[in-house]
Image (cartoon, helix red, strand yellow):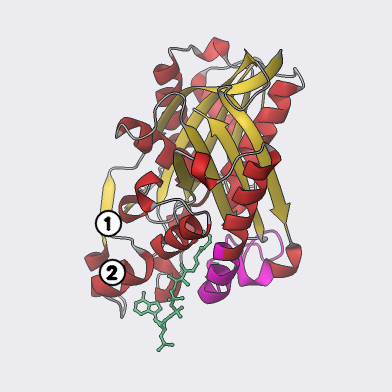
Amino acid sequence: MTTRAVVRGVGHYLPDRIVPNAEFEKTIDTSDEWIRSRSGIERRHFAAEGQTTSDLATRAARAALEDGGLEVADIDAIIVATSTADLTFPSVATMVQAALGMTRGFAFDVQAVCAGFVFALANANALILSGQATRVLVIGAETFSRLMDWTDRSTCVLFGDGAGALVLEAAEGTGTTADRGILSTDLHSDGRHKDILYVDGGTSTGEVGHLRMQGKEVFRHAVEKLAETAHVALDKIGLSGEDVDWIVPHQANIRIIEGTAKRMQVPMDRVVVTVQDHGNTSAASIPLALSVGKARGQIKQGDLVVTEAIGGGLAWGSVVLRW
Ligand code: UT7
């Protein structure tokens, strides 16, 4: 028998305030047409004043627990993928732990920017396979609106706020790719590219800072590296694009999503796309898309799902799982 980390529940939370592209036309030199055609984004959600990343994460966590028919007492560990922690420390994960009333187990954050959820899933999988945890809440939560320079039209129209969560649970499988659960992971980073996507604040400046991005450069790396990592993760278990029921990609740009799917030889009707409604929610985008994809009736039990993401660092990777 082989232990597998199987999805037991999924949920998400989006802040109430929806901002359509047209709203940016009032303050910066941009247009709904430019934003739609260059990124695929039509609207995004922004957190209310005082609403923090841990608030969003806690709501998504509750939704995932409810979906799985679980109580807080059933959870051993919480991992939150985020780059927009409420405070420098403690971790958002411990804040979620307290908000849920969970007084046992352990909680920590993972920071791999837009690839954070893929890194968090791989970590949760390792904790489950090594027997250190039986059920792990894996959350991606962000308030990227707090990092925007509202005068920089090349970035401020692209990002949004939100949170998504999965509960992963240890289960016995047969050791074949027919098993439910995480089947393969592939992680990478290359710090030589740290200057093409970063936030210009932190302990070195004493301020939170603003997101800075060389969009074209990130775009170039994204299409190449995402298809490659997905291919490697599938190849490790003897599968290919043909076997994939759903690609659930990081939702940064529809052109990157389409380019990656094309390279993987997976048609767009097998890709979960939410970028039009959420914008780029960084580490939250994949769990949001998984939750929305399930709610839409796209992702069903037994489907082979590939998640892939790239972000600041650069850090990138993919996870193959059977839902
Ligand atoms: O999640 C982490 C990873 N992040 C990403 O994956 C983002 C990757 N990059 C992208 O998605 C795209 O590069 C962008 C959407 C950011 C930009 O698209 P692009 O096709 O690469 O456009 P560009 O940066 O080459 O800009 C084209 C033009 C420029 O004008 P000039 O220099 O050609 O006159 C920009 O100044 O579009 C201009 N521009 C805008 N125009 C209207 C840039 N932002 C805007 C805007 N509205 N908001």
211 falls in the magenta region: yes
Residue 118 visible, this angle: yes
Q: Which residue is mark 2?
A: 24
Looking at the picture, does residue 172 appear above or below residue 27? above
Residue nearer the viewer, 266 or 273: 266
Which stretch appears magenta? Answer: 194-223
Q: Amino acid type of disc 1?
A: Val
Q: Which residue is mark 1?
A: 19
Figure quadrant of the N terminus: top right
Residue at horizontal 52 percent and vertical 59 percent from the top: 263
Q: Is residue 206 left or right of residue 28?
A: right
Q: Is residue 165 left or right of residue 184?
A: left
Q: Amino acid type of disc 2?
A: Phe
Which quarter of the frame holds ligand 1?
A: bottom left
Residue 109 visible, this angle: no
Q: Residues within 10 Å of mark 2 (few under 14, many from 20)?
A: some
Task: Give the x, y percent position of residue 2.
Answer: 71, 17
Q: Is residue 40 left or right of residue 317?
A: left
Task: Give the x, y percent position of residue 275.
Answer: 37, 54
Looking at the picture, does residue 69 appear above or below residue 243? above
Residue at horizontal 48 percent and vertical 11 percent from the top: 71
Q: Which mark is residue 282?
A: none
Looking at the picture, does residue 205 appear above or below residue 266? below
Residue at horizontal 57 percent and vertical 56 percent from the top: 227
